[in-house]
Structures are given as structure tokens and as C-alpha cells.
Image (tube, grey):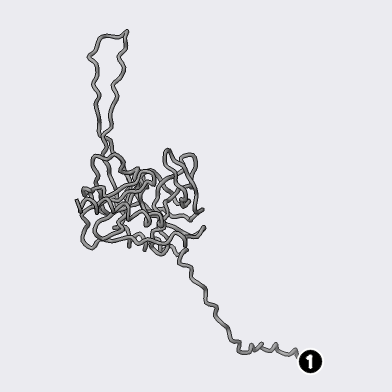
Amino acid sequence: MKKKAKPQARVTKNVKFTTVKMRRTPDLAAGNIADIFERYRDAVVNIEVVKREKETPRRRDPWGPYREPERESSKNTMNIGTGFIFDARGYIFTNEHVIHEAEQILVRFYDSEDGVPATVVGSNYEMDLAVLKVKPPKNCRVLPFATSNNVRVGEWVVAIGCPLGLDHSVTVGIVSATERPVIIGERQYPQLIQTDAAINRGNSGGPLINMRGQVIGMNTAVSASSQGIGFAIPADVLKEQLGALLGTERKRRKS
């Protein structure tokens, strides 16, 4: 009876394996979001505005008991918003509707409880832009501008602001669309950036930042009837109007 042949071990020839280098996409790196916040949180400020609103007196009931006629009075109301430092000398961008008719403006920096008085350097009601000036802290962090023409639909963005007074909240989303014409009240915004990053009351004036740590827009409005639809004024518009906004201060210095 023949013995069964033992199975021979299969010898594999030396095969050269080539490693494929995967392209790392920084836009999707979760660590980058934390890095952006830690790097630029000091450049984002909380804005508190005190306004004085008139109270109209109530009409006297002709059939009720006689009362002395009420005089027109006023009360202080608080408005909140966000801004970001774009110049180390203490210049801050924000929305005009944040500081509109303000009696007093206080700016609070990151991890600070005390507000710093701010003055309005220039504002534009139609374009909803305003520049403030404060005494900057030491080693003041500044947010750089990007070029809006390079903004791509679908790219990741980070919004930093103070929604509902919650200081330095971070939300993340993508650019949903560009050059959106939007009408809000008396203001017409011809070319807003649309994003699904969460933007709420108090985020107005805050930066919309790309994954390179550059401001592509200033958060301005949110759709009240739906979720995930926010808008930002493009960075190119901010840069184009900056000269006119700072021109007000230059004229004061000359006079």
C-alpha cells in the first residue's frame, strides 16, 4: 500500500508591496476644529449693548376712575452680539444691527467677566456693518481675512459666537451656497454666504472661519422659520467697505 505523500508547504515568492500614500484631508480632521478655536478664541469678543427705548403711555379709560396722565418714559434694554478683532490696535468688526442706537457698548474678551468700553468708529446701516474700537489686551490675537472668491460650496466652516449669551460657543457646518440675495426688513443683502453651521441670536457679528483659520464671512442672519439655514456677509465685502468705515475716524482726527 502506497504511503500518502505529505502535503508540501507552499512557498510564496518574494512579492514587493507598494504602499499607497493616502492624501490627508485637513478639512475633515476633527483636531483642526479644536486647534482653530484655541488659536483664535481670544480674537472673538462678546458685545453687550445698552439701549434706551421709549415707553408710550397707556391710554386713559374714559369710563374708569380718574388718574393723572402718564408721562412718556424710557427704559434701558440689553442687546447681545459678537465681534472679532481684525487689527491688533483694537479694531473690531460686527453687525450694525448689533450696536444700532446704542447708549453704551461693552466688549468682553475670552475668559473675562469685566466688559471694556467700546466706541463706534464707523457704521453702515444699509450694509449692516460696523467697526468698533477698544483698548486691546496684551498680545492681542487677530483673525485674518480669506478671499471670498475662493470659498467653495461644501467646504467645512466653523462659527464662533455668543448665541443667547453663551460665550464663545463653537458650531461646525459646511458652506451650503454662495451669493445668496436675501432681504431682511429694510436691508438688502445681495451676496450672502449660506451655511448650515448653527447660528442663533447673539451670533451676529461673529466670524465664519474656514479650516485654514481665515475669516470667510461675518455671521449675520438666520432663518427663523427653519433650521440649518444661516447667512454670513462675505469677507471681500468687509474688506471693500473697511476704508469707508475707518474714514469716519480719520476725519475726526483731522478736525
- Comparing 239 with 133, the one in front is 239
Residue that sits furthest to the front in the current view:
255
Q: How many marks?
A: 1
Residue that sits furthest to the bottom in the current view:
2
- Comparing 63 with 92, the one in front is 92
Residue 179 drawn at (x, y percent): 49, 52
Which residue is depicted at the point 21% across and 58% down?
137
Q: Which residue, given by chain and number where applicable, does mark 1 sit on? A: 2
Q: Amino acid at mark 1?
A: Lys
Which residue is depicted at the point 29% across and 24% down?
56
Residue that sits furthest to the right in the current view:
1
Residue 135, by quadrant, is bottom left
- Eyeballing the image, is 91 above or below 164? below
Q: Quadrant of the N terminus?
A: bottom right
Q: Going by the image, does 4 lie left or right of 109?
A: right
Which residue is depicted at the point 25% across and 49% down?
107
Residue 130 drawn at (x, y percent): 32, 48
Residue 41 drawn at (x, y percent): 32, 57
- Comparing 19 with 123, the one in front is 123
Classify 10 Å Cα crowding around label 1: few (below 14), some (14-19), many (20 and above): few
Residue 29, by quadrant, is bottom left
Residue 6 drawn at (x, y percent): 70, 89
Q: Secondary structure at mark 1?
A: loop
